[in-house]
Amino acid sequence: MFLPTSLKELRARGWERPDIILFTGDAYVDHPAFGAAVVGRLLEAEGYRVAIVPQPNWRDDLRDFTKLGEPRLFFGVTAGAMDSMVNHYTANLRLRHDDAYTPGGRAGFRPDRAVTVYTRILKRLFPHTPVVIGGIEASLRRLAHYDYWSDSVMPSVLATSGADLLLYGMAEGVVQEVARAMHNGYNAKLLRRIRQVAFLADADYVERLDPATTLRLRPAEECARDGRALGENFTVIETQSNLLHPVHTLVEPTGDRFVVVTPPRDDLSTAELDRSFDLPYERAPHPRYEGKGAIPAWEMIRFSVNTHRGCFGGCSFCTISAHQGKFVRSRSERSILAEVERIVRMPGFRGNLSDVGGPSANMYGLGGRDRSLCARCRRPSCLHPAKCPNLDDDHRPLLELYDRILAVKGVKRAYVGSGIRYDLFDGRGDYLRTLVRRHTSGRLKVAPEHTEEHVLRLMRKPPFDLFERLNDDFRRICREEGLPYRLIPYFISSHPGCTERDMQALARKVLGRLHFTLEQVQDLTPTPMTLSSVMFHTGENPYTGERVYVARSQEEKRRQKSYFFEGSRRGEVRRGEAVERRDGRRPDRRDEHDPARHDGGGRRPTAKVRTKGKSSPKPRRD
């Protein structure tokens, strides 16, 4: 059965009162790719009575917030699989007209800053019931952060929402600990001992913390005044989140209180990860949505398999490592094959798995050969500035997994729809040829992101000549195999450090010399808790102190993005000509660090646009 979403469904189970009620900004799809479903099923497996309220109406008399009554233990709140601001607005701050996590793809079924809105309502209606927040929006806003949509540094979401406890990262194990700690009533002392949580505390509590395992951050108010304070905090936060065995508690003054963030838990074991995928999901949207239209995010992943989580790429603009972690955790073959067999039995399955992958499809089973070296490592990326010599990049276990999936009765093809990291393998080896021949539906996605070395360095991406080598190998394999396939590269404009001249060079190389017709392009959206967002706000690399150019205004960002398109640049200059402004003058670099003045203007992009940062339109488990 689905988890109950209404009083009628509650009564059908014979429940008078749930133990836990989860509120989510997404529609309820009972599937391991949707965070609220995962948390609900895990808690259910522990014996708790769990109900879900999907996309509650926050505009009316608030009956959605009261219809199931007060839970015995706590309310859980998540904005959903995406940050609600990324979900609502394009990079040029235009309101989106669709929502992939809503029936019919309709927009308007969740508020801006959904975690804060839902939590404030619940605290007003049920002031004595604990509210626990989590998911990607809460996770990435757990400390002071730059918020692109208000163009300001905002304090922790704990301070703005009034929540009692925050769970960050992929919190399967944490939420079970929290439920056990609350089983006999709210016990702050017990809850504050749990790893991978955040909460507000007073000065007395902070003074009692062990100085040897406590790191004091600069105050949130200072970060709002001084970009370098924000940058200093970020380097500490990112470094600590990327450690294999972190031990430090982070403390950030906020007003007259302190945000306390306990260190992350150790990685989930393969058995623990398998358990969350093996739970009895219905693998479908709740029947309440019948006749209301398809849920696009569900349709996208309906016949796909997630093989692992985490990413050691460490890209500056991406939130995956900040939320899922740097170290890859892979499922067992048994668990993956069992899920494939369940998919084969699903209505509508015609033999083709749409995606066998993860954040980066070819990181399955990869990691450090010597974990003791990993335990001492403080690098944010195992691939930048060069591949770590301790990294085991053997793709043979993944190729063997592909073969076993194809051997499952009822599977005709198993495609890799996720992006791959081409800096992980030699293009002349077995992996690329097997991928192209047997697991590509005609379009192979990769993400070079840019062509210019100084921009790629700030992005933490590999040199462009690796992409050119991949392009040559891909075309050669297609010729030899007689395949009319296409390589689909992703690129970003307006990343810190990128000027119009850099976009001109990109256009010459990609559209001119390599003859690509781009359809997957993006104007950078600075998302919380990324290096790119800090550089965007401060105009400085916090690790080196290097000043970087930032295209701040919407007009600058539109001009940069226009280089992605063929032909005239809407009355400015043509691709390949000298970069000039409308008045004929060269861009004045003295103005490059002026505060942004977002006018919200401009037209909606005419090309397909993707959103970076673990806030991807493809559902991510949180």
Image (spheres, rainbow, N blue to C red):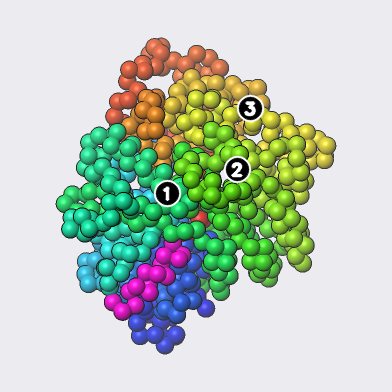
What is the CA distance from the residue labelled 3 to the residue labelled 1? Answer: 31 Å
Residue name at image x 67 percent, y 63 percent: 333
Looking at the picture, does residue 421 appear above or below residue 101?
above
The amino acid type found where label 1 is placed reads: Ser
122 horizontally vs 572: left or right: left
Instruction: For residue 16, say whether it is visible.
Output: yes
- In the drawing, what numbered circle is on residue 241? 1
- Give the residue pinned by disc 3: 465
Q: Which of marks 3 and 2 is nearer the N terminus?
A: 2
Q: Position of residue 349 (x, y in %)?
A: 68, 64
- In the drawing, what numbered circle is on residue 390? 2
Q: Where is residue 207 in the image (x, y as percent from the top left)?
A: 20, 55
What's the magenta region? Answer: 171-185
Give the secondary structure at mark 1. Answer: helix
Q: Position of residue 620 (x, y in %)?
A: 50, 55
The amino acid type found where label 2 is placed reads: Asn
Mark 2, Cα crowd under 10 Å, few <14 / some 14-19 / many 20+, is some
Instruction: For residue 168, say whether it is visible.
Output: no
Q: Which of 348 and 528 is in front in this view?
A: 528
Residue name at image x 56 percent, y 74 percent: 280
Q: Nearer the viewer, residue 2 or 378?
A: 378
Q: Which of marks 3 and 1 is nearer the N terminus?
A: 1
Looking at the picture, does residue 278 appear above or below residue 114?
below
Q: Earlier in the sequence, mark 2 or mark 1?
A: 1
405 horizontally vs 15: left or right: right
Which label sits in the foreground, 3 or 2? 2
Give the secondary structure at mark 3. Answer: helix
